[in-house]
Amino acid sequence: MARNLQLGIESNWALQYSDSFPAVSFLNDAAGNPIYEKITEIHVPVVFDKPIIAVSITTTVPLGKIWKYAGYLSRSLTTGLGASFTGERERLFLGKFNLIVFNDLNINYFVSIQVPKWFISANIAIYQYEGTDTTTIESKIDALNELIGG
């Protein structure tokens, strides 16, 4: 069962969240360089209702360093039991749009992001896919309904 998506159409994506997070510097080392506190887990204050999102994380990479890893994303949802459940973590890559496709449970969810401890800043943008999302089975059923006039 394949999914019919139109991921390449810009208007199918809606920016849901964008923010910047600087690490806090509280002391200097012996050489006078700032020592930064780790950026805590970022709980995104947005409710998502579609199973496909794209996450972008950028930061300032020091000269001579090559960083590819941007941390991980967790999805949590609340059930009728009042408990919050978290699924498997999704690895995120730095400076790219990370396409995250969750199993569609038809339930709203939240996400949180943990960036690596060495980041001294993090810029985050999360887009939700709002376009067509059907399966080949749904398309065939619709085509049959049109043929029989249903």
Image: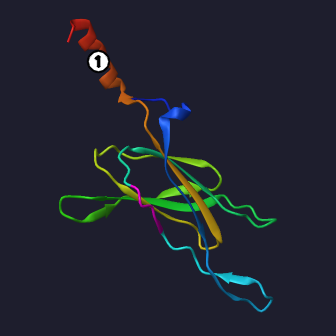
User: Looking at this rendering, what residue extends furthest in the left direction?
Assistant: 81
Q: Residue 133: x, y in percent?
A: 39, 32
Crowding near pointer 1: few (<14 within 10 Å), some, many (20+)?
Answer: few
Image position of 86 (left or right of 62): left
Q: Is residue 1 visible?
A: no
Q: Magenta segment, which residues?
A: 42-46
Residue beneath the point at 72% across and 83% down? 34
Which image quadrant for residue 43?
bottom left
Image position of 22 (left or right of 31): left
Residue beneath the point at 49% across and 29% down? 6
Which image quadrant for residue 33?
bottom right
- Give the dominant element type of the magenta stretch: helix, strand or loop: loop
Residue beneath the point at 33% across and 21% down? 139
Image position of 15 (left or right of 107): right
Which image quadrant for residue 80?
bottom left
User: Looking at this rendering, what residue extends furthest in the bottom direction?
Assistant: 30
Colouring method of the image = rainbow
Q: Residue 29: x, y in percent?
A: 74, 89
Which residue is identified by label 1? 142
| 116 w.r.t. 5: above or below | below
For mark 1, give the secondary structure: helix
Taking depth in this image into account, of 148 and 124 the one nearest to the observer is 124
Image position of 145 (left or right of 24): left
Q: Quadrant of the N terminus?
A: top left
Q: Residue 129: x, y in percent?
A: 45, 40
Q: Residue 47: x, y in percent?
A: 37, 54
Under mark 1, the amino acid is Asp
Taking depth in this image into account, of 53 and 17 the one nearest to the observer is 17
| 117 w.r.t. 145: above or below | below
Taking depth in this image into account, of 47 and 52 the one nearest to the observer is 47
Q: Quadrant of the C terminus?
A: top left
Q: Is residue 129 visible?
A: yes
